[in-house]
Image (cartoon, grey):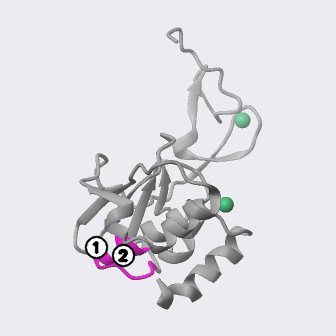
Amino acid sequence: MDTNEGAWKKCMEFHGHRCSGLLIGFRASLYAMELLDLDYSQDEEAACITENDACGVDAIQVVMGCSAGKGNLLFKMRGKQAFSFYNRKTGRSVRLILKETAPMEKEEKFRYLKTQPAERLFEVQEPTQAFPEKARSFGSVKCACCGEMTSENMIRLQDGKKVCLDCFIPYSRFL
Ligand SMILES: [Zn+2]
Ligand SMILES: [Zn+2]
């Protein structure tokens, strides 16, 4: 990992502190880039579906250039240390899930995550989720209730009027 010290520093600057969680995302990113032959994603060449919103996600943004704003970082919240990565150019993808370890104290865990080979840290699987569609841009509609401009895909019809999700009264009788 020595050659990547610079990248790791950038991750810590972005994230604000040094932690094992960040390191999980960092190692997962580098491993995915190696497996899928990816570089830093200027546009949407790479995409990531993360199954958690924990510390590691910050490293994915810094190292891979997958970010929420660019639309190539998607959250499928499952509370798992698992990430699916996609290479749009080649159509290849992997899901990396952190392997279980014996309980460790904090620093020991950090050292373990830093020094073990990636294949020992992560199980490599086929993603369960199909390739995410490229980010679409939508037109805006004025909500008939609050008057705020709202992206079309977030509009509902209520009493024949187009309303935003804040003004919409959901009708769901099943729990
Ligand atoms: Zn953290
Ligand atoms: Zn509204």
Q: Residue at x 44, y 60 (%)?
A: 135
Q: Secondary structure at mark 2?
A: helix
Q: Is residue 161 magenta?
A: no
Indicate which disc residue 36 carries: 1
Q: Residue at x 62, y 58 (%)?
A: 55
Disc 2 residue type?
Met
Disc 1 residue type?
Leu
- Quarter residue 10 falls in: bottom right
Residue 134 horizontal side relative to residue 156, left or right = left
Residue 63 visible at all: yes
Q: Quadrant of ligand 1?
A: bottom right
Q: Nearer the viewer, residue 2 or 86?
A: 2
Point out the stretch of residues depicted in magenta: 30-41
Q: Is mark 1 within 8 Å of ligand 1?
A: no
Q: Is residue 161 above or below residue 147?
A: above
Q: Is residue 25 above or below residue 165?
A: below
**In x, y percent, where is residue 105?**
61, 55
Q: Is residue 83 above or below residue 111?
A: above
Q: Mark 1 and 2 residues: CB-CB less than 8 Å, in contact?
A: yes
Residue 66 visible at all: no
Q: Secondary structure at mark 1?
A: helix
Q: Is residue 112 above or below residue 160?
A: below
Q: Residue at x 54, y 14 (%)?
A: 172
Indicate which disc residue 87 carries: none
Q: Residue at x 57, y 37 (%)?
A: 155
What residue would you read off at disc 2?
Answer: 33
